[in-house]
Image (spheres, rainbow, N blue to C red):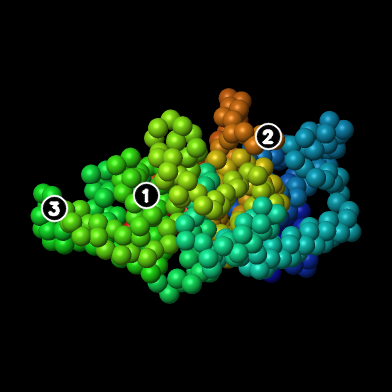
Amino acid sequence: MDNPTVLLVDDEAPIRKLLSEIATREGFAIHTCPEGDAALETLAEHHFDLMMVDLRMPGLDGLEVLRRARPFIGSTHVVLMTGYGSIDSAVDAIKLGAAEYLQKPLNLSRVRELMREVRASVERREAVVASEGALAERLEFCGMIGRSAQMQELFTTIRRLAPFVRTTLISGETGVGKELVARALHTLGPRREKRFATVNCSAVVETLFESELFGHVRGAFTGATDHKIGLFESADGGTIFLDEVGELPLAVQSKLLRVLETGEVQRVGSVDSRKCDVRVVAATNRNLEVEVAEGRFRSDLYFRLNIVELVVPPLRTRREDIPYLAAAFLRHFAREFKKPIAGITPSAERLLIEAPWPGNIRELRNTIERACLLGEGRLLTERELQPGASRFGAAPDGVVRPPVPPPASTPSPVVPLPDREAVVAALGQAGGNRAAAARALGISRRAFYRLLEKYALQ
């Protein structure tokens, strides 16, 4: 475990020296600031486990520092110190997120006890993080992670069906992991050594659908200069995954039905049929019963595909899985970005659990990736996770609602990750000064340098 961190903010050098000596003996990594503005700059770039700030300082006083630092504090244990205590200032400090209010001259025994309590809290949190990471590995099933009853039931069903089923329909919202379910069926079945072919039915040009799926012969249409085998033939003996099958044109639906019923494909422009033994797994985020009722999907094809239907639940209905999914994604991206990130702070984890996740697991993964890119310390905090997990107000009924606009005086805690054009523009406006460009974009210098690497702007 890395040492816990403390930020000491006091305009009196002897106080900073005394607290630094105590913090060093208690095993803390120390940052000190003589005034409020410097403290805010430090807080904007680093997460601290403990912050001790003086109430009365030149410039920004302690309460104003807390007020402006609220977006950055998160799970930091905040202590306000003062030689001029009052009931009103104590109440204000608590409202602004302070956990303790210490009178000067400081009770050094209480200071040491406080630091030990914070260190113990950090150690407990890291133990929980390690436990969640280890459990996430044990819960992994063919690339999926789920401790919830819904997912465990889904995993059991996949195990039972994989050796036998030839045609399966997987339904679920966008981003829930339907392709992982399809791959699990293939991996656990008797065709695992054969090809797993994927076609995104929403991404193929309608006029080329038939050629992509079934192939064509030379001269079948303009541009067909040679014979081509389709995906069904190329996956012979294996599995073909039809993603977003609800997007198939009606003309292709009838030919797909014929292939499923006869086990034969006919290339475009050919009069001959070819035997083709494939397992067909189709997926959709649409309600195909509604599509059938409204004439956009053939009923006979729907019933042929829907011999067995697997429903993948949305993330908002299985929130108990979020800590383990987040732990797995964090471990992956920490390794990829070569970061020492070990886990997520408790308040950041609550933010993840309470968010509605309209984009499901894909959105959670993207949020963790972005947070790992921006993260500087050993724990991810709320500021790295925003605006990903907090873009929408979480609702207890799981319904996604627009966020409530913050008061006009509330500063935006984090800006979205800039794209390449924004980085180039900021560099140009700053005359090539990277520190100034980072400030203009509202991100730390370290995050800015990583964006330069990502966009090959070194």
3D distance between C-alphas at marks 1 and 3: 22 Å
| Camera-nearest label, 3 or 2 | 3
3D distance between C-alphas at marks 3 and 2: 54 Å
The x, y position of residue 348, in whole percent, is 66, 49
- The answer to which quarter of the image holds residue 196 is bottom left
Q: Compared to 408, does 453 lie above or below?
A: below
Q: Residue at x 25, y 60 (%)?
A: 273
Looking at the image, can residue 443 be seen?
no
Closest to the observer, 277 or 57: 277
Mark 1 is surrounded, within 10 Å at the Cα level, by few (under 14), some (14 to 19) or many (20 or more) other residues, namely: some
Residue 220 is labelled as 3
Q: Residue at x 29, y 55 (%)?
A: 213
Residue type at mark 1: give it: Leu
Sequence-first tag of 3 and 2: 3
Mark 3 is surrounded, within 10 Å at the Cα level, by few (under 14), some (14 to 19) or many (20 or more) other residues, namely: some
Q: Which residue is mark 2?
A: 397
Q: In screen coordinates, is 424 left or right of 326?
A: left
Q: Which residue is mark 1?
A: 257
Q: Residue at x 40, y 38 (%)?
A: 297
Closest to the observer, 128 or 221: 221
| Camera-nearest label, 1 or 3 | 1
Q: Secondary structure at mark 2?
A: loop
